[in-house]
């Protein structure tokens, strides 16, 4: 815990003086009782009913003053609180390698079930979008708070050839910053712009690229990438990850499958599909995210459920002066109530 005005903590040195003043008053009362024998006998009789009660109200009042003095110094604590207006993009691999059954019933079915668990775990205030990628990538569900639309988009996945992990990252980033004018076509090299015809209006100039920020510094959005990591098409994964990192967005990668993999057949061809953990770990490290490995459907579902709860929380410094002020007032009122109840006077 830190303080905005730490110098005001010197006020706490007044508390020992108040304790000395209280002890001095007690001694004066005791001396008065000794000078008057009759009063001493009355005091002895009353002390049987008072005991520790005599000192509890002053102690509570002293603690209340201490809490108020700490509040004056404006304490700041690091708290983890639910974050509003957060955007999370699920980037899902739908390449032919997701047909592999090393994660039962197969990688795609396990990924879909886990994605549904993820959507169920995030609160309604969080916007979730879905990007599907194979040889190319597409935003199949723009960020929305409608969980039914998100689940429907996940259920529509169809396997395709190729694995463009880099394209998936770039399309997910463009979904987070739709007003930034990110040129996906130029970055991924997917297709070429048609030539201008005579007399046609040229396209508007592209907005300047913003200066890079510290990786992981953008708190309002995140990308969850699920893939086996084996790139066969699209831009280099490392370059795409660096582009995302320069915008401060974290990428949490989830590897599905086993390093040994298995042989799968698709539309007349067959190949061994393995988990490329090095690529997925590199993406997570470059963007200050985390990497998770799932070897079973239940493990994958648990990872997604935990991520859904984790990504909507935000750790930040929050001033807690009000809490200390409330505590101080509560202790002072309790001290006054007990004193009135026991001794028919306020302290």
Image: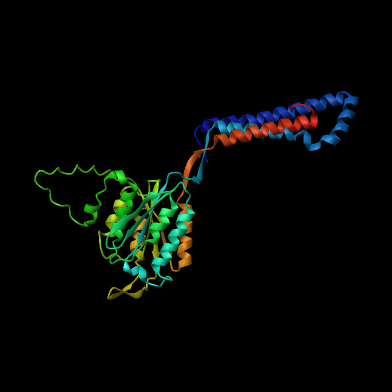
Q: Is residue 291 above or below residue 274?
A: above
- Number of on-image labels: 0
The residue at 39%/51% (across/down) is: 222
The residue at 30%/63% (across/down) is: 134
- In which quarter of the view is residue 104 placed? bottom left
- In which quarter of the view is residue 156 placed? bottom left
Q: Is residue 164 above or below residue 213?
A: below
Q: For residue 245, say whether it is visible.
A: no
> Residue 311: image x %, image y %?
45, 51
Q: Quadrant of the C terminus?
A: top right
Give the color scheme: rainbow, by chain, secondary structure or one colour.
Answer: rainbow
The residue at 54%/37% (across/down) is: 320
> Residue 243: image x %, image y %?
29, 51
Q: In this orientation, which residue lies closer to the viewer: 231 or 163?
A: 163
Q: Is residue 26 left or right of residue 256?
A: right
Q: In this orientation, which residue lies closer to the viewer: 73 or 93?
A: 93
Q: Is residue 270 above or below residue 71?
A: below
Q: Is residue 102 left or right of residue 40?
A: left
Q: Is residue 230 left or right of residue 61?
A: left
Q: Is residue 86 above or below residue 159?
A: above
> Residue 192: image x %, image y %?
17, 55
């Amino acid at each position: 815990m830190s303080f905005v005005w730490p110098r005001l903590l010197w006020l706490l040195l007044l508390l020992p003086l108040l304790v000395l003043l209280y002890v001095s008053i007690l001694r004066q009362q005791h001396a008065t009782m000794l000078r008057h024998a009759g009063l001493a006998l009355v005091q002895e009789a009353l002390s049987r009913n008072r005991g520790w009660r005599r000192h509890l109200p002053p102690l509570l009042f002293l603690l209340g003053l201490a809490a108020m003095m700490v509040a004056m110094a404006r304490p700041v604590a690091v708290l983890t609180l639910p974050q509003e207006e957060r955007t999370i993009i699920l980037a899902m691999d739908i390449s032919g390698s997701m047909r592999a059954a090393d994660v039962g019933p197969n990688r795609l079915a396990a990924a879909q079930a886990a994605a549904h668990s993820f959507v169920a775990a995030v609160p309604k205030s969080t916007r979730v979008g879905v990007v599907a990628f194979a040889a190319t990538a597409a935003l199949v569900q723009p960020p929305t708070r409608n969980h039914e639309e998100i689940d429907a988009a996940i259920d529509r996945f169809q396997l395709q050839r190729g694995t463009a992990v880099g394209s998936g990252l770039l399309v997910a980033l463009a979904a987070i910053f739709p007003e930034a004018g990110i040129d996906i076509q130029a970055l991924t090299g997917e297709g070429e712009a048609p030539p201008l015809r005579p007399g046609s209006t040229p396209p508007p100039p592209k907005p300047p690229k913003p200066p890079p920020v510290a990786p992981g510094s953008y708190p309002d959005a995140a990308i969850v990438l699920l893939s086996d990591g084996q790139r066969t098409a699209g831009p280099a994964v490392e370059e795409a990850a660096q582009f995302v990192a320069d915008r401060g967005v974290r990428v949490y990668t989830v590897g599905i499958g086993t390093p040994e993999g298995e042989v799968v057949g698709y539309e007349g061809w067959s190949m061994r599909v393995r988990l490329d953990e090095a690529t997925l770990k590199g993406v997570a490290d470059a963007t200050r995210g985390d990497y998770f490995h799932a070897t079973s459907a239940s493990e994958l579902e648990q990872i997604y459920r935990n991520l859904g709860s984790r990504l909507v929380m935000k750790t930040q410094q929050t001033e807690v002066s009000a809490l200390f002020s409330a505590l101080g007032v509560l202790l002072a009122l309790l001290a006054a109530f007990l004193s009135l109840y026991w001794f028919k006077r306020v302290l």
